[in-house]
Image (spheres, helix red, strand yellow):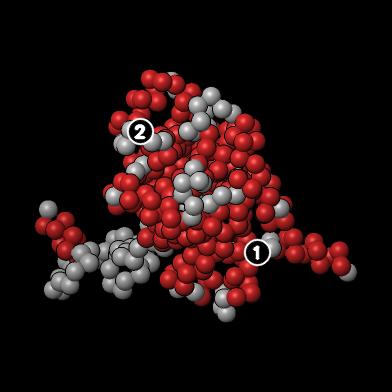
Amino acid sequence: MIRSLLETAQSSPFPSVPVAHCEPAAEPAQPSLVHGRNIAAFSTAEPEYSCEYGSPKFFAIAGLGGVLSCGITHTAIVPLDLVKCRLQTDPEKYKGIVNGFRVSIQEEGVRGLARGWAPTAIGYSMQGLCKFGFYEVFKHLYSNILGEENAYLWRTSLYLAASASAEFFADIALAPMEAAKVRIQTMPGFASTLREGFPIIMKQEGWWGFYKGVAPLWARQIPYTMMKFACFERTVEALYQYVVPKPRAECSKGEQLVVTFAAGYIAGVFCAIVSHPADTVVSKLNMAKGSSAIDVAKSLGFMGMWKGLTARIIMIGTLTALQWFIYDGVKVALRVPRPPPPSMPESLRLKLEAKQQ
């Protein structure tokens, strides 16, 4: 027992007084990293990443980042979204952004600008979960199917396919809250809160009332998201290649987030233009009972579908930039792997060099 205590004291990593050995050690000598102590080295430094790229934890954190990025940003710009929807659905009354705000405040007060915040917060949080989480899932899946070389050569198509697949499911999650939001914001006399409005839609139209706008929502959101992700990915690649004066690996986390914000804003402007006609149809459709998307598009006409574009460019540009900033910020904070812009695989480079010779 005494010998056991002595051996324990000798193997302690803390300083101790010298202890005389009565018997020579019988065990064979083992290499040690700490001289005179038969212990393994222990590092207190945290690992660089909290999970592996493509692991379930990675995808879960990506979904969390999507919830925060979409939920926070869309809820923050509810007043601008409310005016934009009213410009689209009643252009005779609301003649511009400034006029729209003025008329809305005159009729409902400043608090009225927050109408629809609850379905916005819930709906776009659910959408963000599916949009960003599934995008990472599908990008990883399609990359493995294509292989390293084809994934690099066809990377733009890869981004487009992954984002379209993700948005298909994201819009199914968003549709019920989007239907409630548009009615609350644009239909005079309708309920002013989600708690009151949800049962009304269910009673009058059933579940179809929440999903009748899902097809035009796909028409609006899928092109928007394809542009949002593909344009962002390629813009980041271009910024690091032509604008940023040093490689991404040498940039600080803050500098990388600035590049993320800039690329997000550029992508957002293109997103707004591509998806605006369908957005106008969705806004009008949700307040026009019994109408189809084709009927609404015909009644609006080509020029009518572009009403409110300026407000939407401001809104979506800022929104998209902030979403990417928050999403990337969550990854940085939780130490999630953030692969650098894609580079040509060595095997592909050797094949191309061989062809040129």
Task: Name the residue that disc number 2 marks.
Answer: 189
The tally of labels here is 2
Figure quadrant of residue 38: bottom left
The quarter of the image holding the C terminus is bottom right
Instruction: Give the percent coordinates (x, y) of residue 186.
Output: 42, 39
Name the residue at 28% across, 68% down: 37
Name the residue at 38% across, 51% down: 103
Q: Amino acid at mark 1?
A: Ser
281 vs 75: above or below: above
Per the image, label 2 sits on a secondary structure element best described as loop
263 vs 167: above or below: below
302 vs 341: above or below: above
**Along the line of sight, the residue nearer the viewer: 296 or 8:** 296
Instruction: Give the percent coordinates (x, y) of residue 180.
Output: 40, 34
Task: Name the residue that disc number 1 marks.
Answer: 343
| 38 relative position to 241: left or right | left
- Which label is found at residue 223? none
Is residue 72 among what the camera can see? no
- Residue, far front: 92
Name the residue at 57% across, 59% down: 269
202 vs 75: above or below: above
Closer to the chain start, of discs 1 and 2, is: 2
Is the residue marked by circle 1 packed among few (<14), some (14-19), or many (20+) residues within 10 Å? few
| 138 relative position to 63: left or right | right
- Say which of marks 1 and 2 sits in front: 2
Is the residue marked by circle 2 packed among few (<14), some (14-19), or many (20+) residues within 10 Å? few
Name the residue at 42% across, 43% down: 124
